[in-house]
Image (cartoon, rainbow, N blue to C red):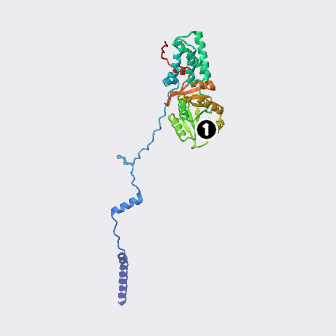
Amino acid sequence: MTEYLLIALALLGVLILGGLGLVVPRLRRRPQPPLPETEVDTRAGQDLAGPPVEAPEADLATGILVEPPPVVEAPPAVEVPEPTAGRLVRLRSRLSRSQNAFGKGLLGLLSRDRLDEDTWEEIEDSLITADVGIDSTREIVDRLRERTRVLGTRTVDELRALLAAELVNALDPALDRSLRTAPSDGVPAVVLVVGVNGAGKTTTCGKIARVLVADGRSVLLGAADTFRAAAADQLETWGGRVGAETVRGPEAADPASVAFDAVKRGIDTGVDTVLIDTAGRLQNKVGLMDELGKVKRVVEKHGPIDETLLVLDATTGQNGLEQARVFTEVVNVTGVVLTKLDGTAKGGIVIAVQRKLGIPVKLVGLGEGKDDLAPFDPAQFVDALLGTEPLARDA
């Protein structure tokens, strides 16, 4: 009996100790008050989500998330320049100032009742003042005097025809004025554009690109004027308008290297013509002229240069002839681009350039518009200079 009692007490003690073991730990852990729901949400958003992100809109019918389409910028529209055929005729009104000072003045003198020595001297002075040049003027006046004496020409129309014939003859219509811009044996034609500072060379280079595109050529531009920060940007803008790529280098890069890369790129892409704009040179700076010669030599490692066009400002008059002569000695100029003929320029400078240099004027700029550069035609040019209005004979 005593043994059963001891066993019962032992079991009771075990149960009591086990119960205490379960209850005491719970009493030691005091529960923490819960955080407010809004505080938890705020901290979670700041720590994990970052700034709020708008979720893609869902299709109401299917519940599927729909991503908005990407925004694609439309490429700039490529312009189509107007054809160059007949462009000089369309721009003849731009020669009105030269016409008034040149053509009408000469026809007024020639239509006098009496063509004496004083009149012929006035005619000679008018031609010299119009920048025709002394040698060309004497030749034109001598031929006019002889023809009017032999033919007995007296009417204004007849005198105009004689004068026009002599002026066209002085412009040497037999000179080749075509631009050699066709590729040969897989190599594009290379056109080098040179000129002094201030002649509008980079702008003219862009207009030449438009002339070539208008005539069906694919063009690549080389921005070898690396000394003027805006030159490459300006050229690239001109090229972009007609879909022409521009190869450029960093500012103050070696111009010859940029020109070489442009031709190489032209070969790789298979364009018809590579047009290279060079830095404006002062003809009395020997170092700069030597550098221009280096550009020519480096480019010719790819093949011969097909055209070297000299940009001249027509308003500089006879001073432009010295510029042209020095450039010819360095890079063998094949053609002249005469700009600003619509302003205060005197039309006779065209005759003087060809008489002195034997280099044809191939393009003339008759305004500031993007398509105001026209292929030069002697007969059309003289016709525009002289005009067609009838002149009254002096009493």
Which residue, as the protein is rendered here, is positioned at the far front?
Answer: 118
Q: Around disc 1, counting alpha carbons within 10 Å, would you say few (fewer than 14), some (14 to 19), or many (20 or more)?
A: many
Give x and y (percent) for residue 364.
54, 27
Q: Residue at x 61, y 19 (%)?
A: 138
Quadrant, the N terminus: bottom left
Q: Is residue 76 above or below residue 13?
A: above
Q: Amino acid at mark 1?
A: Ala
Res 280 quadrant in image: top right
In this rendering, the count of numbered labels is: 1
Residue 155 coordinates in the image, percent (x, y):
52, 11
Residue sitting at the far bottom = 2
Q: In the image shown, does 158 or 392 lie closer to the viewer?
A: 392
Q: From where the camera sits, is residue 360 visible?
A: no
Q: Nearer the viewer, residue 352 or 194?
A: 352
Q: State whether residue 155 is above or below residue 21.
A: above
Q: Is residue 58 left or right of residue 78?
A: left
Q: Residue at x 43, y 43 (%)?
A: 71
Report the residue at 62% width, 28% height from top: 334
Residue 126 placed where, x, y %? 55, 21
**Label 1: which secondary element:** helix
Residue 331 placed where, x, y %? 64, 33
What residue did someone put label 1 on? 259
Q: Is residue 44 visible?
A: yes
The answer to which of 191 and 164 lies nearer the viewer is: 164
